Image (cartoon, rainbow, N blue to C red):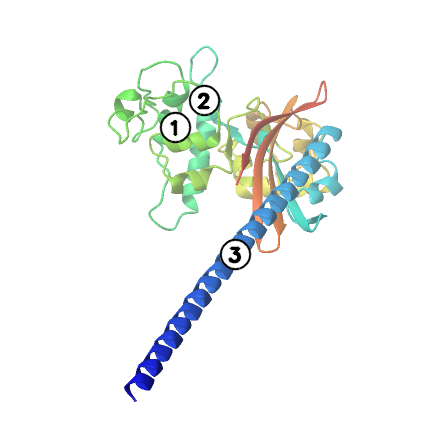
Amino acid sequence: MKHNLSKTKRSGFVVVVVLCMVILMSVLLLGFNRGALVCLRAADDAGKTTQTLNCARAGLNIAIAAVRDTPDIYANRNLANLLSGKGVFDVGGGNCSVTVTEEDGKLNLNLLKNKDGTLNQTRIDQLLRLIDLLNQEQTGRLRIDYGLVPAIIDWTDSDDQVTCLPFIKNQNLGAESAHYDTLTPPYKCKNAPLDATEELLLVKGVTPDVFALIHDYVTVYGSGEININCAPKHIIESLSEKMDPALAQLIIDRRKIKPFETITELQDVSGMTDGVYNAIKKAATVRSTAQYYQVVSRGNAGQLGSTIVALLRRDTEIKTIEVVSYKEI
């Protein structure tokens, strides 16, 4: 009996060992299958990400072709609608949408000083009026301080003297390296033109919230003249203290019907007085020699998406396109 009992115990032990091995193998196989599934999904996502990026690149090429071959995309209603971000293009199993914004309709922050180092009072006043307009829309505590203006001047000019704007009662001082050296981490005042609007985030007084308020209205490219055919309403309002919101909207309504071909056509807009026209005619244009366009191209495939933000420069005289900046998101 003892012998049979011993054999039974050994048999039971073998069964237990076999079961443990089966369970262990099952766990290993499940782990392997799960790992393989994760790898397959990652590979699939990587493939779709590449696909979305290619779709975004296709959208950028559409924008480049449109800008290169059309003297004024805003005068061509089909292109203006096509490049508004509302249209979707099917591209190889995915799609893309494109938004084109002309930088010449924005205020150039690199030109707050003239070439001889003197203050450009016209553009400074315009920036101050823009700040007022943006602040009027804010119901909370977020406000853009006037100190942003001298701070930008100090960041972009070549000297180390702190700018003071005496025609501003408060917040009229800029900042040089002495201020930026106290920050964590410290850095130097650039004392050179801005290379991109995102660089404003380094300037005294520019928080991410402030940047979000102002970045659609400012640029670092162009001649400084405001293209009245593509300028946002706030930029048109900021051209003169005599310009009211109603007149700015009438200008926008008029250009939707037919873009302005000459500045003198502004005189035909209902409500345009000689005083307003004379105040804005030197700061405005209807077409620039060198045109800058910001392109935002969004590519999608399945649930994934990629975005390309690029800046194009079109020379209207020799009809060339230059990609000034390129960023994949």
62 with respect to 145 (left or right): right
The reply to whether residue 133 is in sight is no
Q: Report helix, strand or loop for mark 3.
A: helix
Circle 1 crowding by C-alpha within 10 Å: few under 14, some 14–19, many from 20 = many
Mark toward the start of the polypeptide (1 vs 2): 2
Q: Which mark is residue 36?
A: 3
Vertical relation: 36 (above or below) 176: below
Circle 2 crowding by C-alpha within 10 Å: few under 14, some 14–19, many from 20 = many
In the image, what residue occupies the spot 48% across and 37% down? 215
| Number of numbered discs on residues | 3
C-alpha distance separating marks 3 and 1: 57 Å
Q: Which mark is residue 149?
A: 1
Circle 1/circle 2 CB separation < 8 Å: yes
Between circles 2 and 3, the one closer to the viewer is 3
User: Residue 82: x and y, percent?
Assistant: 71, 44
Q: Report helix, strand or loop for mark 2.
A: loop
